[in-house]
Image (spheres, rainbow, N blue to C red):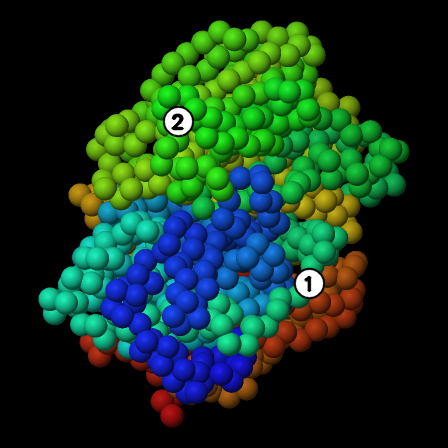
């Protein structure tokens, strides 16, 4: 077979060879290939030279086939942070790093990127998606896909389509008007399929306009017929629920396996003439095409190898990317960057200062080899000549976290960690492993040599060593029966259950807990044994559907929990205030918790959890040089934003968080980010995530995020879409449009700007289109293009912003296609959707 570039479709010769191989398979062999072999792999088929093919989450790093600390992964910044860079080459390079990570773990297909839109900040997976804007989402997504697939690893764009919230996500029907569906929600997928040539698409859990997505006519009508997509469509995990409707749709692969609605049932349907075997052949051909692209077929040249990254280059890439996504939202009197030479004492405060969040919960979870906290990064950067003090301020979590490794000792006394034993019903030891943490997940298997079907109990043994005197909360969290013994005595035997009607995924992410308090002296040790019975979840849950039952039976997930002693919020706030008062600068790191931002549930409030707002205000009163770092993947309310010297939005920035933060605070790196989504000032008027009678109506239509500016009921945001400050200032000089826009054409719009500040800087030049007096309902303005430029102090630079014809088109529902309203549009250029000093007319013609 002739080798092709990794982003191109196979040649006719390649297609003929794939078809020949397909023709050697029986119906049973073909159908077997169309359901996964297990949670993370596809069946091999020696008859066609197909090896086992491995898939992996996810958007924040390549986890591989294990969901725990035994398989560490580079933790990259969250997708919101990547989109905040507005930097396509940077994101493409990061995609290459992810391809390297994938190949190192034996992964062929990465289940990313997620390109659902930020319809509402309440969306639970908001952090896992790029932006509220379809163009920015598409361009960052294309760069991500090119980077990953340029290394011979398939990307999977997801979740097609309308999976923009988590509440009842398995069953809700998203009602989306045709224009909004085409112009907003499908638009990123269209560009990533066309321009990015992505190799795989994932069909979502939810339905759209009356059809579950795994059996939706949109798969064939849009992906195949409209976009000529030649890749593979897989289901989200456990999303496929029917045999014939999903098989007749353009769904190609059911995941995970080996259970699922196809298998023997699909073979029988084909034999009975209810499903055309040609549909099965097309699905298998697409699977073989994917296998050829990633090098999973014998006698096919290997794909392009990803660039090599050693540990140092990974760290450097992640540090650079994190800083490039930080958004400096406020910088009163240029308080930042800090002058290292003038600092003597810095207070680093807040609940996320010493234990920061680097990623969100759910399928985006990876286990990094290390994380650099803000406290550690700042201390390392300032060195011994600056005193760095620390106070937690408040404890916003209502849940007890998984036990930190530093408190755990192996029962035999040999270092840090726990012993995990797998036991049969009669207590026979079936297997054992040593683990380095308190969170445990097994998907479909307990590992090599352990007979999974015989495991009745999982037992965690450890010795907890107190670092400080006080009361320690020790316990377990999960679904099912748990027993805890401390110092040889059983302290509880409970059955933890989800409330009626709960989503099992939410239960897995934030499971019920049971705790026991133990008073320990400093240095005292006590033996702890947590035992979990691995029974089917239908015995301990109520009101959940068969999809949840299947997931529950396939997954064992629980935690050993430990909360060390700490002061009350009142005590910790007073301590933080005292430290701030004595410091030259106070850096307060606030943020969300795993109870707030995760897959499996939506947010019910945009407020920072706990008493963090009070902490910020009290610290700012004590020290006017207060810099607040916001560690959240999605917008939160900042009612104190005008009371502090600076606000830096850091997102979930990955494992190099602290080092990147120190670089930005001290001016070694530019805070390069611009907002990919509006940060609201209030919760009033935001789109809801709660379905009514199973239907979630997208009543806002075209007017999500900044596209709702100026409409009835509109409220000014805290920070506008595209907003972000640097360490210099810019003057927008002129805008030039060469000619008029024609169908299918592109225009190179030139925007001249001048660096009017004191240092080298980077600016994201944004161009928005509008149509005053339009006969078609439209937003006031919408993003048409953008470009990143750099310049020295006093230097002028020209940003060449490519604007294509689609920017001026709308979906005509009467003809079922794209149409342009002829006449005069306007283009506005500036630094955000709210700051657009330059404007020019542009004519749109029909030929």
585, 507: nearer the viewer: 507
Q: Which mark is residue 531?
A: none
Q: Quadrant of the C terminus?
A: bottom left
For label 2, count other residues whose C-alpha is less than 10 Å away and answer few (under 14), some (14-19) or many (20+). some
Badge 2 vs badge 1, beta-carbon distance below 8 Å: no
Q: Residue at x 27, y 44 (%)?
A: 547
Q: Residue at x 66, y 75 (%)?
A: 798
Q: Position of residue 129 (x, y in %)?
A: 46, 54
In the depicted structure, whether residue 545 falls above or below residue 777: above
831, 731: nearer the viewer: 831
Looking at marks 2 and 1 on the same chain, the residue that comes earlier in the sequence is marked by 1
Q: Left or right: 72 with respect to 254?
A: right
Camera sees residue 324: yes
Separation of disc 2 and disc 1 at Cα? 44 Å
Seen as rendered, the residue at the extreme bottom is: 847
In the depicted structure, whether residue 729 falls above or below residue 687: below
Q: Left or right: 282 with respect to 413?
A: left
Q: Position of residue 351 (x, y in %)?
A: 60, 29
In the depicted structure, whether residue 610 falls above or below residue 203: above
Secondary structure under badge 1?
loop
132, 375: nearer the viewer: 375
Give residue 684's quadrant in the image: top left
Secondary structure under badge 2?
loop
Q: Left or right: 345 with respect to 541?
A: right
Q: Residue at x 31, y 78 (%)?
A: 23
Q: Position of residue 601 (x, y in %)?
A: 37, 39
Q: Position of residue 236 (x, y in %)?
A: 35, 54
Residue position marked by numbered label 1 in the rendering: 308
Q: Residue at x 66, y 53 (%)?
A: 318
Q: Which mark is residue 424?
A: 2
């Amino acid at each position: 077979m002739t080798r092709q570039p990794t982003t191109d479709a196979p040649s006719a010769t390649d297609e003929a060879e794939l078809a020949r191989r397909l023709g050697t398979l029986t119906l049973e062999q073909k159908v077997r290939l169309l359901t996964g072999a297990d949670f993370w792999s596809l069946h091999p088929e020696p008859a066609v030279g197909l090896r086992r093919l491995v898939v992996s989450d996810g958007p924040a790093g390549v986890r591989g086939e294990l969901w725990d600390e035994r398989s560490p992964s580079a933790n990259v910044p969250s997708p919101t942070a990547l989109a905040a860079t507005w930097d396509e080459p940077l994101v493409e390079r990061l995609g290459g790093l992810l391809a390297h990570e994938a190949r190192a773990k034996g992964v062929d297909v990465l289940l990313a990127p997620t390109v659902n839109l930020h319809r509402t900040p309440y969306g639970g997976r908001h952090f896992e998606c790029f932006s509220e804007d379809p163009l920015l989402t598409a361009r960052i997504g294309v760069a991500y896909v090119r980077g990953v697939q340029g290394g011979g690893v398939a990307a999977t764009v997801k979740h097609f389509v309308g999976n923009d919230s988590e509440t009842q996500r398995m069953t809700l029907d998203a009602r989306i008007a045709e224009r909004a569906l085409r112009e907003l929600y499908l638009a990123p997928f269209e560009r990533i399929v066309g321009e990015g040539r992505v190799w795989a698409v994932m069909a979502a859990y939810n339905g759209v306009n009356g059809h579950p997505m795994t059996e939706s006519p949109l798969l064939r009508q849009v992906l195949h017929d409209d976009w000529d997509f030649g890749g593979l469509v897989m289901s989200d995990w456990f999303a496929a629920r029917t045999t014939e409707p999903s098989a007749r749709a353009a769904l190609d692969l059911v995941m995970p396996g080996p259970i699922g609605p196809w298998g023997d049932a699909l073979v029988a349907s084909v034999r009975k003439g209810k499903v055309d075997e040609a549909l099965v052949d097309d699905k298998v051909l697409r699977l073989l095409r994917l296998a050829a692209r990633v090098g999973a077929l014998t006698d096919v040249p290997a794909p392009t190898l990803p660039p090599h990254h050693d540990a140092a280059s990974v760290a450097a890439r992640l540090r650079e990317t994190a800083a490039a996504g930080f958004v400096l939202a406020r910088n009163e009197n240029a308080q930042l960057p800090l002058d290292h030479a003038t600092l003597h004492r810095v207070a680093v405060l807040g609940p996320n200062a010493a234990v920061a969040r680097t990623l969100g919960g759910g399928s985006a979870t990876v286990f990094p080899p290390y994380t650099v906290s803000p406290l550690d990064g700042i201390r390392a950067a300032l060195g011994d000549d600056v005193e760095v003090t620390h106070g937690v301020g408040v404890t916003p979590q209502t849940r007890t976290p998984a036990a930190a490794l530093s408190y755990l000792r192996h029962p035999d006394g040999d270092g840090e960690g726990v012993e995990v034993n797998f036991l049969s019903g009669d207590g026979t030891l079936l297997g054992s492993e040593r683990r380095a943490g308190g969170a445990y997940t097994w998907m479909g298997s307990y590992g090599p040599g352990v007979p999974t079907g015989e495991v009745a109990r999982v037992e965690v043994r450890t010795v907890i060593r107190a670092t400080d005197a006080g009361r320690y909360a020790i316990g377990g969290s999960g679904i099912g029966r748990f027993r805890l013994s401390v110092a040889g005595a059983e302290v509880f035997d409970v059955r933890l259950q989800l409330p009626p009607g709960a989503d099992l995924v939410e239960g897995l992410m934030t499971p019920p807990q049971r705790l026991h308090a133990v008073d320990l002296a400093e240095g005292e040790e006590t033996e702890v044994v947590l035992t979990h019975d691995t029974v089917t979840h239908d015995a301990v849950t109520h009101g959940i559907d068969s999809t949840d039952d299947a997931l529950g039976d396939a997954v064992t997930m629980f935690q050993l929990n430990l909360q060390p002693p700490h002061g009350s919020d009142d005590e910790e706030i007073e301590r933080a205030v005292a430290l701030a008062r004595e410091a030259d600068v106070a850096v307060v790191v606030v943020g969300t918790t795993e109870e707030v931002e995760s897959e499996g549930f939506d947010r019910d409030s945009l407020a920072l959890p706990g008493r963090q707002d009070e902490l910020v205000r009290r610290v700012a009163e004590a020290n006017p040089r207060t810099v607040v770092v916001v560690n959240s993947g999605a917008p939160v309310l900042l009612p104190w934003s005008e009371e502090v010297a600076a606000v830096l939005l850091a997102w979930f920035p990955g494992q190099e968080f602290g080092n990147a933060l120190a670089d930005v605070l001290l001016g070694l790196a530019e805070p390069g980010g611009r907002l990919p989504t509006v940060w609201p000032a209030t919760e009033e008027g935001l789109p809801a995530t709660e379905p009514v009678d199973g239907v979630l109506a997208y009543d806002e239509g075209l007017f999500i995020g900044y596209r709702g500016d100026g409409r009835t009921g509109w409220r000014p945001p805290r920070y506008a879409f595209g907003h972000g400050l640097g360490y210099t200032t810019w003057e927008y000089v002129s805008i030039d449009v060469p000619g008029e826009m024609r169908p299918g054409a592109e225009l190179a719009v030139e925007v001249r700007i001048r660096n009017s500040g004191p240092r080298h800087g980077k600016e994201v030049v944004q161009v928005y289109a509008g149509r005053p007096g339009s006969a078609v309902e439209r937003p006031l303005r919408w993003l048409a293009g953008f470009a990143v430029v750099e310049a020295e102090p006093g230097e002028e630079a020209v940003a060449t912003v490519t604007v294509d014809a689609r920017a001026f088109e709308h979906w005509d529902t009467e003809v079922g296609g794209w149409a342009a309203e002829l006449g005069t549009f306007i283009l506005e250029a500036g630094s955000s959707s709210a700051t657009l000093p330059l404007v020019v007319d542009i004519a749109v013609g029909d030929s």
